[in-house]
Amino acid sequence: MHLFIEQLINGITLGSIYSLTALGLTLIFGVLDILNMAHGAVFMFGAFTAVLIVSKLGLPLWVGFLGGCIVSGLLGYALEMFALRPLRRRKNTSPLAPLISTIGVSIILENIARALFGSDTISFRTSISDINFKLGEIDINLINLVILAVSFTITILLYFWLKNSKSGRALRAVSENPDTAAFLGVNTSKVITFTVVSASCAGGAAGVLVAMAFNSVNNEIGLAMGLKGLAIIILGGMGSVNGAVAGGILLGLAETFVVAYGDSGYKEIIGFIIIMAVLLIKPQGIFGTTQKVKV
Amino acid sequence: MPDLEIETLSVCYGHVEALRGVTLRVKDRQVVSLVGANGAGKTTLMKTIAGLIPPLSGKIRYNGMNIDSLRADEIIRNGISYVPEGRAILNKMTVLENLLMGAYIRQDREVMADLENILEKFPILGTRKDQLAGTLSGGEQQLLAIGRALMSKPKFILFDEPSLGLAPIVIEHIFEIIKDINESGVTIMLVEQNVHKALSISDYAYVMETGKIAMEGNSKELLYEKRVMDAYLGKKAK
Ligand SMILES: Nc1ncnc2c1ncn2[C@@H]1O[C@H](COP(=O)(O)OP(=O)(O)OP(=O)(O)O)[C@@H](O)[C@H]1O
Ligand SMILES: [Mg+2]
């Protein structure tokens, strides 16, 4: 039984990071109607930045965490300014243009990462990496608790900000109908920039947390995480915040339990198996809604 | 002078010229209606005033100020609110959230008091306030769109076919509300298919035909003008 509970904690921890990653993607999808294929690369830069700050500069973990968020946020800003906004300004561009543009940015970022950080796995040991304690029969890693606390806090803050604040409402309005938001007084361009930047910050935060969870970082996690993020928001329902959170937790649990009780070879594909199963039953995703057409 | 003045306004969708040199004036505190057949360009004109479509050429002045190059979010900050064709309710938000979005541009402390007023004025919205707006009936959505526009405390409201798809008794109610709003000092520009009703509550009217103003005059006089009906039905005026 205690083994099961330990796996449950591991699964929820991993899942909470997935949720945070997917939240960023789903918010960007909401306001821009595009899949941000550069999200994984932005996430990876957050992770590398934290590792550099903590391991190379010897600064405390929280500085590394903030640094990772800031660098990812800046990358998000650059993505919006150079890859997305110029395309919105032009008329008659293909609806696929921004998607291709984000793929381009992700390739550029992957290459920069390789040049800057090399292709080796860099280990990431922090002051709290090896602290374990027992709660009855259950082994608990302090780092898992920290990760859980951080990712849940960010997720909950984001959730309530979206739900209850004026600017959160404006973001949801832009998501639903940019023209309506605009004639009600929302500067949609500002909201979009703000969304891409904060989603990227959240992605960077998730990157740091993943580096903490696995005690290492390498330049493949960006692509892997980007794809998982996409899988999660398709699973949860595109643009749905609840869907991103639930989908992330579900995937984290599924991966953890497959490794613990099944065959670890299935870890990377279990998510996609779940997606296919869910989409067969509910094609719009768990929390997805089909747009009602009103005449 | 706080009038809305439009001068030789032209608007294009790609190569389709939807407005071709429209000139009109909405005098302060009046109700001015704009009627015309389907496709005449009425909605295009409304959207252009609201800042959603950039004009190709021509001028739009409000309060003596040029507003033709302002974005939509700047237009409403100048006191011009928009109740669009099809209502454009935010379906995934509650009735209350839609009304709060109406007050998005306001910073003052009276927003909550005004919200109470609207809910009192439109009691049906009060009973539905926590419901998702997408679940409201067409008539309720129209009331919500009007309430939302009022929440910005506008000086001027653009109404695009507020009676569209509503039952006669509801239409009656909507027109009453529009009259009340005008009596409270708000200038109104009203697009309607319901020509008779529109003319009966407006001071002045313009008839549009394929992107141009075909006729104008005092509403009371146009009520008896046969050519208005012809334009509405899309026949060529002789
Ligand atoms: N987004 C668009 N792209 C291209 N053409 C458009 C677009 N919107 C409108 N048009 C064209 O512009 C002309 C004017 O349309 P508009 O919607 O302004 O007419 P309307 O007078 O409001 O008609 P209705 O009474 O049916 O609402 C029409 O010929 C229409 O086909
Ligand atoms: Mg129209």
Image (spheres, grey):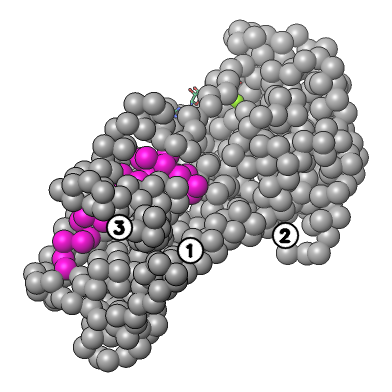
Q: As drawn, is A50 to the left or to the right of A104? A: right
Q: Residue at x 30, y 69 (%)?
A: A213
Instruction: Estimate the x, y position of residue A148 in percent, counting from the top left.
Output: 43, 66
Determine which residue is flagged by label 3.
Answer: A39
Q: Looking at the picture, do discs 3 and 1 lie on one chain?
A: yes
Q: Amino acid at mark 1?
A: Phe
Split into 4 quadrants, where in the image is the C terminus of chain A? top right
Determine which residue is flagged by label 2.
Answer: B106
Q: Is residue A53 above or below residue A46?
A: below
Q: Is residue B39 magenta?
A: no
Q: Name the chief secondary structure element in magenta.
A: helix
Chain for disc number 1 = A
Split into 4 quadrants, where in the image is the N terminus of chain A? bottom left
Determine which residue is flagged by label 1.
Answer: A152
Mark 1 beta carbon near ligand 1 (under 8 Å): no
Q: Marks 2 and 3, Cα distance to the nearest angstrom?
A: 35 Å
